[in-house]
Structure formats: structure tokens, C-alpha cells
Image (cartoon, rainbow, N blue to C red):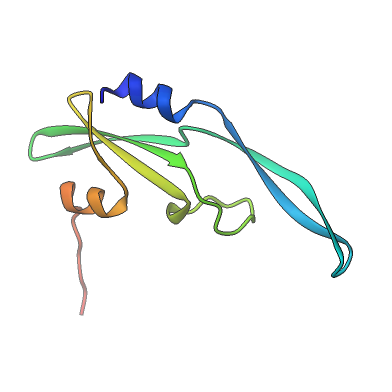
Amino acid sequence: MDKEKVLKTMGREEKGIVTWIPILFPLIWVPFPSYHINNPYKTEFLTVNDKQYDVIYYYTDVRKADGAITDDELTPLIFEDGKLIGWGWSFLKVKIPTYEIRIR
């Protein structure tokens, strides 16, 4: 798929996050809108071995409704030359390796 078709399919809208709060603990819990997140959440442009990749991150999973967005709550979509070549963290780590410095 090309990038525009993916963006149209995935959407470009806010995602509302709801926190459930107790009114009469533990019997009644009511939804309380906490915050909104724009999707796509962020974009990166990476260059590896003279190849350019566009990585678009979508907010897809709520792990903890604490207002902080962590990587495990995002799903990366990886594009090369305007075409979707894969998605997910495992694909990103294999396709676009990062430099690691290990200190003993």
C-alpha cells in the first residue's frame, strides 16, 4: 500500500482515552474522559545504508491510563519509497537496526 492509502485506512483522528473511576467502590465505576491523542502520534525519518525510511507511529494500545505515552503503546508503520513494507516493533528492529554501545 502507498502511504496515503495507509493513512486513510488507519485514520487521522483523535483517540479519546477513558479512565474508569469508582463512585461507590467496588460496585459502580463510571467512565471519565481523561485526554485525547492525535493519530498518527509521531513520525520519524531514518536513514540506514543510504536508504530513507519513514516511520509513522500510531497510538494503538493503552497499557496504563496515566497520561504518559510509551513505546509499547505505539505501533510503528515502516515505509520505503512511499510504500508500506512492514509494521510492528519486531519488523522495525530487524529492518532498521540501531547502533548499540555496550559497556562492561
When asked about the image quadrant of residue 3, the answer is: top left
Name of the residue lying farthest toward the left: 49
Judge by depth and name the residue closer to the eye, 8 or 51. Answer: 8
Q: Please determine whether, in this image, residue 43 is positioned above or below residue 29.
A: above
Task: Judge from the rendering whether residue 26 lies leftward or rightward of residue 12; answer left or right.
Answer: right
Report x, y in % for residue 27.
87, 66
Task: Judge from the rendering whether residue 62 lies leftward or rightward of residue 71; answer left or right.
Answer: right
Picture quarter with the C terminus: bottom left
When asked about the image quadrant of residue 79, the answer is: top left
Judge by depth and name the residue closer to the eye, 40 or 61. Answer: 61
Q: Residue at the location (11% across, 33% down)? A: 51
Name of the residue lying farthest toward the bottom: 104
Report x, y in % for residue 30.
82, 53
Task: Judge from the rendering whether residue 22 lies leftward or rightward of residue 75; answer left or right.
Answer: right
Picture quarter with the N terminus: top left
What number of labels is visible?
A: 0
Q: Residue at the location (48% across, 52% down)? A: 73
Q: Please determine whether, in this image, residue 46 is positioned above or below residue 27.
A: above
Report x, y in % for residue 26.
84, 70
Judge by depth and name the residue closer to the eye, 104 or 96. Answer: 96
Report x, y in % for residue 100.
20, 61
Name of the residue lying farthest toward the right: 24
Q: Residue at the location (64% across, 56% down)? A: 66
Q: Residue at the location (44% across, 39% down)? A: 58
Name of the residue lying farthest toward the front: 27
Task: Judge from the rendering whether residue 34 lies leftward or rightward of residue 37; answer left or right.
Answer: right
Q: Please determine whether, in this image, residue 94 is positioned above or below residue 24.
A: above
